[in-house]
Image (tube, grey):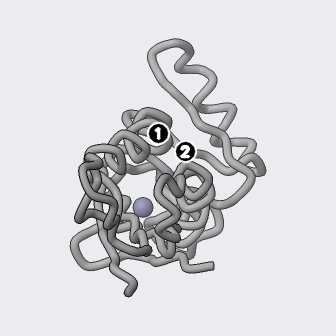
Amino acid sequence: MTTIIRRFVETDTGHRVPNHKSKCRHMHGHRYRFECEIEGDVVSISGVSEEGMLMDFSDVSKILNEKIHDVIDHSFIVYEGDKDCISALKIMGDWHRTIIVPFIPTAENLAKWAFEQVSPEIKNNYDNKLKLTAMHVRETPKSWAIWRP
Ligand SMILES: [Zn+2]
């Protein structure tokens, strides 16, 4: 039987959507919430630490922290084609952290990016068919995107 667990991490991150028709073209930031969905079978091996679990929540958090939070928290994500923005950010030197990505950093694209960072880290330790099935990215309390391959 398949079970799903969900766990999230939050980051304070800046971005802009360069071709947007309205205010999203301005440099601004969000408290992003990246929430993963992991599917698999509950571990039934007697005596192991994960008995009765799909995966230890603390292990999921460690992955989300290393692969998402520590990479983009208190950073500004910018599309590699957004040359004017990259130039403007370079002026700020060391007191700013810029993450250049090959996509426009919308919630939809960040969900796919985060999925790709986390998916290889979901290891199948007990042959319980663990896999990342979705990544949710919330930009605001009213707006989020979900990537499911
Ligand atoms: Zn935004």
- Residue at coordinates 49% horizontally, 52% vertically from top-left? 125
The image quadrant in which ligand 1 is located: bottom left
Is mark 2 in CB contact (under 8 Å) with mark 1? yes
- The amino acid marked with disc number 1 is Ile
| Secondary structure of residue under mark 1 | helix
* Residue 77 tag number: 2
Q: Quadrant of residue 66?
A: top left
Q: Is residue 63 above or below residue 26?
A: above
- Residue at coordinates 53% horizontally, 57% vertically from top-left? 124
Ligand 1 under 8 Å from disc 1 Cβ: no
Determine the CA span between mark 2 and mark 1. Answer: 7 Å
Judge from the rendering whether residue 139 lies leftward or rightward of residue 94; answer left or right: left
Q: Quadrant of residue 70?
A: top left
| Secondary structure of residue under mark 2 | strand
Q: Is residue 111 visible?
A: yes
Front-most of residues 95 and 113: 113
* Residue 94, horizontal then vertical, whole percent: 52, 12
Front-most of residues 129 and 94: 129
Count neighbours of disc 2 (C-alpha within 10 A) and say few if under 14, some if 14 to 19, many if 20 or more. Answer: many
* Residue 28, horizontal then vertical, whole percent: 40, 50
- Residue at coordinates 46% horizontally, 44% vertically from top-left? 68
- The amino acid marked with disc number 2 is Ile
* Residue 72 tag number: 1
Q: Is residue 107 visible?
A: no
Judge from the rendering whether residue 124 lies leftward or rightward of residue 43; answer left or right: right
